[in-house]
Each structure stands twice: as structure tokens, then as C-alpha cells.
Image (tube, rainbow, N blue to C red):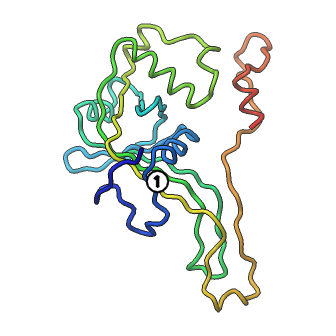
Amino acid sequence: MEYPTNDRNKVKRLPKRGHYDQETIFGILDDAFLCHVGFEIAGQPYVIPTAYGRDGEVLYLHGSSKSRMIQHLATGAPLCLTVTHLDGLVLARSAFHHSMNYRSAVIFGTATLVEGEEKMHALEVISEQILKGRWAEVRQPNPTEMKATSVLRITIEQASAKIRTGPPGDEAEDYALPIWAGVVPAELTFQDPLPDPAMDQAHELPASVKALARK
């Protein structure tokens, strides 16, 4: 499936890097858990970083029930959600042609409040997006915590992805310059876990953390 395109989501700068198919867009979403959500209140734009989870064609966000973002988006106000992966620094022979290799997705849609059994499911989806397997290892939210937390379900109306790969693209006359050029790959990695000093006894690392450490 491809998302319909118009002036809102069409990639105009270097359109050959644009993608509109769900497989590409969902792949970018599934490789991350941090997004930035843009919205406007009374003419003032805001962009808020937050965690998310994807379940099929639905995205979930959560936050305090008193959150300005949550309360505003729950009214059905339009939103724009972005996810970006930095895959490498592209170092050219000229300053002008330096760039980055990246994968980015831009989502347009609206949100509704999640209630009932779906709310707990949505929180599990977000938890599993961040660290697969952790939800089953910990205490589940109690009624007080659930009341203090609101969850939004985002309906994706339109979306696009933009991807850059490969080496720098220098001017023809610059290739003879005695300057190193190429790509420095980049990826998100996690360091050795640090146990909470408040634990009253030694505990073996849970499976979710062990799996993360192997990545």
C-alpha cells in the first residue's frame, strides 16, 4: 500500500529519495522508539519528543493526563510526527557537499483518546517498542497509575519517507583534490547496564536487557 500524495506530504527536494509505501515507512518506525510530535495551539507551534509504539496501522503515544500535548491532540487537532535515523556522516571534498546518510519518516494525522482494555494494550505496545520483552518482566500499571496516564491512538492519514545512502557527490573537478572523503557509519548502541544501587540483592540481568546488550 502507498499513502496518497499531495502538497502536504510530497517530497519536493530531491524527490527521488522520497518513498510513500507502508513497508518502507513502517520499517523506519519499527527501528526506533523516539519521535517528535509537532502541533499548534493558538498560533504557537510546539515540537515535543516522546516515545511511541506501532501496532499495525496505528501509532500510540502516552503521557500525563494533564499534559498540554495530550489534552490538545485528544480534541482531534492535526499533528505531524517525525522519526529520523542517522546512518552516517557523509564527508565530501568540499564543505558544500557534506551531508548525512539518513532514514526519516513524516506522519500526518489526528489522534483520539484510548480507553478500556485497549489502553493497557497500548501501553504494552509502547513498552515493547522501547525494549522488547520488558513488559512481561515488570509490575503492570495499577489503577492509580492508569488514571494518571493518558494514551492517544494516532490514525495515519498521510505519510512519506526520505532516505539518503551512499558516498558523497562532489563536483567533477574536486575528485582530484588531495582530501579524504567518504562515509563514517553511525548507529545507536547501548553501553553496559548499570544496576540500581537501591536493589536489596543481586539480580541476574533480565532477558530483555541481555538481548539489548547483544545488539
Q: In the displayed orientation, state which residue is furthest to the top.
A: 143
Residue located at (45% from left, 31% from top): 56
Instruction: Please tell me whether residue 81 is drawn above or below residue 62 in the rendered image.
Output: below
Q: How far from the left and from the top, in percent, is residue 136?
A: 61, 14
Disc 1 crowd rating (10 Å Cα; few below 14, some 14-19, many 20+) is many
Residue ranking furthest to the bottom: 173
The number of numbered badges drawn on the structure is 1
Please state if 179 lies on the left or on the right of 73 as rendered: right
Q: Position of residue 156 (x, y in %)?
A: 35, 39
Q: Is residue 166 above or below residue 142?
A: below
Which residue is pictured at 62% across the width and 81% down the height? Answer: 170
- Left or right, residue 176 beside residue 5: right
Instruction: Report the front residue among 69 and 30.
Output: 30
Left or right: 193 as drawn, with respect to 70: right
User: Is 120 on the left or on the right of 31, as rendered?
Assistant: left
Pointer 1 residue: 161
Q: Residue at x 39, y 46 (%)?
A: 107
Dot 1: element: strand
Name the residue at the front extreme: 1
Q: Could you say where residue 46 lies in the image, as x and y percent from the top left?
A: 33, 47
Residue located at (40% from left, 43% from top): 48
Residue 9: image location, x then y, percent: 34, 55
Q: Quadrant of the N terminus?
A: top left
The C terminus: image quadrant: top right
- Kind of residue indicated by mark 1: Ala
Q: Residue 10: name its quadrant.
A: bottom left
In the depicted structure, whether residue 148 falls above or below residue 102:
above
